[in-house]
Image: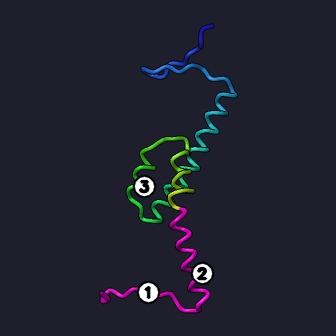
Amino acid sequence: MKAKTQSMGAMSFPELPPGGKVVIGAVVVWSLAWKGASLWRAARNGSKPWFVTLLLSNTLGVLDAIYLFAVDRPHRSEHRVEEAILAATGEPEQLAHSDET
């Protein structure tokens, strides 16, 4: 059984059945959702190495999920603990001054 091909310049692609197009579309949406969330979080945290790694890799959301749930989670829990301590003591947040050593 020969696959029909559509010519697109120098490249040719086999014609996909409608179900195949849906699967490819779902994979693209899945990857973009994970990629967007992880890049946004890495940029927000100021993590340039993770941002570049996530931007250049394409792992269908696997590396993005690892960053979101394993790497970034300790950072977020430390922030929650600090907020809980400030709320329990009633003290205002200590802001750093540029003239402090």
Tell me the residue that label 2 is attached to.
84
Tell me the residue that label 3 is attached to.
50
Q: Residues within 10 Å of mark 3 (few under 14, many from 20)?
A: some
Which residues are drawn in magenta? Answer: 73-101
**Residue 95 figure quarter:** bottom left
Disc nearer the start of the sequence (1/3): 3
Q: Amino acid at mark 3?
A: Trp
Spot occupied by residue 64 in the image (x, y as percentages of width and height)? 52, 50
Tell me the residue that label 1 is attached to.
95
* 31 shown above or below 70: above
Q: Secondary structure at mark 1?
A: loop
Q: Residue at horizontal 45%, vertical 43%?
A: 57
Q: Residue at horizontal 42%, vertical 45%?
A: 56
Q: Residue at horizontal 42%, vertical 20%?
A: 10
**Residue 24 figure quarter:** top right
Q: Residues within 10 Å of mark 2 (few under 14, many from 20)?
A: few
Please, which residue is most extreme toward the right here? 19
Disc nearer the start of the sequence (3/2): 3
If the image is split into quadrants, where does the N terminus sit?
A: top right
Spot occupied by residue 89 in the image (x, y as percentages of width and height)? 58, 91
Spot occupied by residue 99 in the image (x, y as percentages of width and height)? 30, 89
Q: Secondary structure at mark 3?
A: helix
Disc nearer the start of the sequence (1/2): 2
Query: Viewer-nearest of labels 3 and 2?
Result: 2
Q: Amino acid at mark 1?
A: Leu
The Cα–Cα distance between marks 1 and 3, rounded to whole angstroms, is 27 Å
* 27 shown above or below 15: below
**Residue 43 figure quarter:** bottom left
In the rendered image, residue 77 lying in the magenta stretch gets the answer yes
* 85 shown above or below 53: below
Disc assigned to residue 18: none
